[in-house]
Image (cartoon, rainbow, N blue to C red):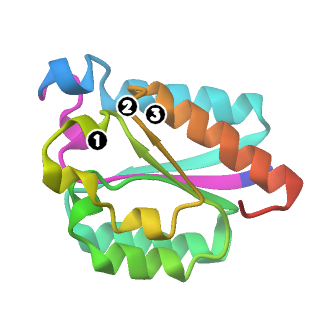
Amino acid sequence: MSLIYVLNGPNLNLLGKRQPHIYGHETLADVEADCRRVASELGQDIRFHQSNREYEIIDWIHEAREVAAGIVINPAAFTHTSVAILDALNTFEQPVIEVHISNVHKREAFRHHSFVSHRADGVIAGLGTEGYQLAIRRVASLIKSGDKK
């Protein structure tokens, strides 16, 4: 059984309460339950984290370097601002899939740029919280094939 880290950035703790017309009605607990179900079906384990603090996300990426076979990350607003998260991801040699609940390309222009995409092996955007499940499936496929991309 391989370990996949699922990392969530700022304000995702408010899923289901914050702008449901953009982010839906599912809570972060719902997302975690779905991720655990899919990971279990695929013979994978997950560590699921959320933080509003950039340094905690960086620390989890550093931790993942030692124990994880892949990362699924929704960096939220840090997507557009954090070179530090990009630098941390660049030290992680396993698959990374970037997830966004909304279609960031239909939103404000500043959301169209992602630092994380420079490292991600794939990007899923605009598929709601189902994007997490698809990302876990893709990471599991890459782990099984031994491929990074």
Q: Secondary structure at mark 3?
A: helix
Please state which of residues 112 and 81 is positioned toward the viewer in this rendering.
112
Residue 80 x/y as whole percent? 23, 62
From mark 2 to mark 3, how far is it between C-alphas? 18 Å
Read off the magenta span.
3-18
N-terminal of the pair, mark 2 or mark 3, is 3
Q: Which residue position is annotated with label 1?
A: 105
Q: Which residue position is annotated with label 2?
A: 126
N-terminal of the pair, mark 3 or mark 1, is 3
In the picture provided, is 139 more to the left or to the right than 130? right
The image quarter containing residue 5 is bottom right
The image quarter containing residue 55 is bottom left
Q: Are marks 1 and 2 in contact (CB under 8 Å)?
A: yes
- The answer to whether residue 36 shows anywhere in this view is yes
Tell me which amino acid carries mark 2: Gly
Residue 68 x/y as whole percent? 65, 64
Marks 1 and 2: which is nearer the front? 1
Residue at figure coordinates x 30%, y 78% from the top left: 83
Query: Quick one: quadrant of the C terminus?
Result: bottom right
Within-10-Å neighbours for mark 3: few <14, some 14–19, many 20+? some
The image quarter containing residue 57 is bottom left
Tell me which amino acid carries mark 1: His
Is 112 situated above or below 95? above
Q: Which residue position is annotated with label 3?
A: 32
